[in-house]
Amino acid sequence: MSEGKGQTMWGGRFATTPSDIMNEINASLDIDRRMAEEDVAGSRAHADMLAEMGILSAEDNEAIQKGLDLVTGELRAGTFPFRKELEDIHMNVEARLKELIGEPAGRLHTARSRNDQVVTDFRLWTRRALDETSHLVTGLQAALVRRAGEHVATVMPGFTHLQTAQPVTLGHHLLAYTEMLERDRTRILDCAVRLNECPLGAAALAGTGFPIDRDMTAEALGFARPMANSLDAVGSRDFALEALACLSIAATHLSRLAEEIVLWTSPQFAFARLLDEWSTGSSIMPQKRNPDAAELIRAKASLITGLYASLQGAVKALPLAYAKDLQDDKRLTFEAFDTFDLCVRAMTGMIGTIRFHPETMRAAAAKGFSTATDLADWLVRELGLPFREAHHVTGRIVALAEEKGVDLAGLTLLDMQTVHAAITADVFNVLTVEASASSRTSYGGTSPVRVAEQVAQWTQRLRLE
Ligand code: ARG
């Protein structure tokens, strides 16, 4: 076989180079170049370990480390010569190192394979992404808590089945999302704990005969320990699946909030208005203020779930250990993080600036006989009726109000007494939306006192002062 034919790094046994289309389907550089710094970090740790174990000479290691300094400099300066024909980031870094330092570069790949190299890089990348994403989630929580603090006593309709149910406070409603996001954030952090084992040293799949020290490389890269099974190390991607599952669940929460923004900002609800920065106009209907960012968040939540499903599909039928199907894991994961992070930023911007309309919310809260439960509770408390009977009496009073075209507080005492003679004027004290919301003081309830407590706790937890 003549020199130069098999120009690829693995081309020793090949008579001709791959076809252009083969290169195109095989190359992953456009995607995995985002892991360049992780790749350098993995190589540094590996070379240090090889030197420590006497597998690489101290001089070669020094040359390699200096060369990797130069590579890092080029990466940060944007001058690194990425070459797609070299397939992926691993071969790009190694080839550049060879150009910079010559022969010692060829010794770096002793006792490792791209299979353990790629998944080490990928775990490092995902670990950092999870950390950054958790901070973005905290930022959104902070925005929600601030707005909740402004609206502990703002009354709005609470819905079930999107039918007016009982008055709630806006602060309470916003804090519901803070709670969901806290579970999302801690799920993300849990995932990072399980992810934090080092696959480096698993080599192609079976480990290596060289006397490597896997604890040393694991520690150098900030992993808790080396992975215990080499086949698992190179063949598993559940860390990425778990990360995408976390993002999918969190995005689902963002989507629900986005849907509420869409509803609240519609002229029919008019509970809130997005600032100009967070609205778009229509090219034909000048009156429109469209909540596009919220709508896109709603759509992107499905996209993220789809990325999770795609990765699951790629992994579910793979025999151990590595197969090239796993190359696409990064495309899916990067897109999921990029999309999720953008959604959180947009949601944080909208929540931070949205203008609420307390009067409209209050008026809506008073519609739909929203204090009927308070009336029934009053009958139980003051007249000693069993709840089931109180429910029935209240139902008849609601029907009477409906017939007369008034709300509950619009009925006269006499009207009420035609349904149940023992009712007194005291009942009117519980029929306002403010009284209704304020009365719900059970732990976790909507009353302004409880919401103010929760806001104070969250403010402290998130160190917002
Ligand atoms: N670019 C590859 C990936 O992302 C690197 C691992 C290649 N290993 C192999 N045996 N071809 O998965």
Image: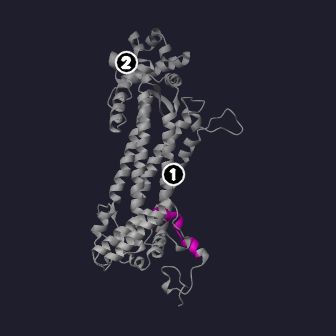
For the stretch drawn in magenta, the main secondary structure is helix
Which amino acid type is marked by label 1?
Thr
- Report if the beta carbon of the residue with label 2 is closer than 8 angstroms to ligand 1: no
Q: Residues within 10 Å of mark 2 (few under 14, many from 20)?
A: many
Identify the residue under disc 2. 379
Q: At 48% from the left edge and 75% from the top edge, which residue is drawn? A: 99
The residues colored magenta run 22-35
> Horizontal and vertical percent for residue 259?
53, 40
Residue 128 lies in quadrant: bottom left
Q: Secondary structure at mark 2?
A: helix
List x then y, in percent, for residue 413: 45, 10
- The percent coordinates of residue 423 (x first, y second) are 39, 12
Which amino acid type is shown beneath numbered disc 2?
Leu
User: In this image, 299 relative to 198: left or right?
Assistant: right
Q: Badge 1: how crowded within 10 Å, few (<14), some, or many (20+)? A: some
Q: How far is disc 1 from disc 2 in space, using C-alphas?
A: 52 Å
**Does 33 appear in magenta?**
yes
